[in-house]
Image (tube, helix red, strand yellow):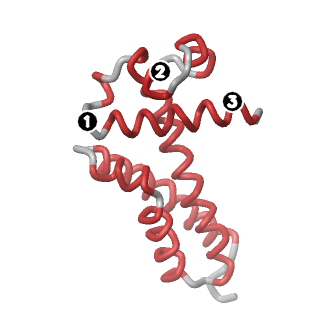
Amino acid sequence: MDKRVEKTKEKLHTALIELMEKQPLYSIAVSRLCKKAGINRNTFYSHYENTADILEEIITYYEKMAIKTIQETAPGRDFEQMLKEICLMMYNDKNLRVLMTLDDFGARYLARATKKCNEQIVEIFRQSPLSQ
C-alpha cells in the first residue's frame, strides 16, 4: 500500500476511535471525522463509503493480528501461550482497548474474533494430527 494512503487510513482510524469514545458510530458525521483526522472529504470518499467501513477495516485488522498470533504459536502446541499472546496483543493496543470498552462493541467484537480464531485453531487441528 502507498505510504500516503497508509498514513491517511491511520489518521482516519485514530480519529474514528477518538470520536467513538464520545459518541456512537452512527452519529459520527463524515465531515466531523475528516476534520478531526485533518483530511479532505474527497480523500475520505476515495477510500470509504461511510464511517462503518473504517470500523470494519479496524476490526478486520485486529482479527488478522489474532490469527497471526495463532499461526505463529500453534506449531509449538503451546495453546496457553497462544491465549496469553492474544490477550497481550489486545491489552497492549490502546485503540483496541478503547474499542473494547465501548457500549456493546466489545462483546460484539469478541464474539466475532473468537469465532474467527476458533475456525483457525480447528483448521490447524485438521492439518496436524494431535498425536504428533
Relative height, residue 25 to residue 97 (above, below): above
Q: Quadrant of the C terminus?
A: bottom right
In this picture, residue 19 sits left or right of residue 89 = left
Residue 67 position, x and y percent, is 58, 60
Looking at the image, which is closer to me, 21 or 25? 21
Task: Residue type at mark 2: give it.
Answer: Cys
Give me the disc on residue 5: 3
Residue 95 position, x and y percent, is 43, 50
Residue 77 position, x and y percent, is 61, 83
Say which residue label 2 marks.
34
Q: Dot 2: within a 10 Å radius of its alpha carbon, few (fewer than 14), some, or many (20 or more) residues?
A: some
Task: Residue type at mark 1: give it.
Answer: Lys
Name the residue: 47% across, 70% down.
Answer: 88
Q: Kindly check if marks 3 and 1 are in contact, taking CB atoms under 8 A apart as contact.
A: no
Q: Dot 1: within a 10 Å radius of its alpha carbon, few (fewer than 14), some, or many (20 or more) residues?
A: few
In this view, the residue farthest toward the top is 42
Task: Residue type at mark 3: give it.
Answer: Val
Cα distance in 3D space between marks 2 and 3: 14 Å
Name the residue: 42% across, 33% down.
Answer: 16
Label 1: which secondary element:
loop
In this picture, residue 118 sits left or right of residue 9 = left
Q: Quadrant of the N terminus?
A: top right
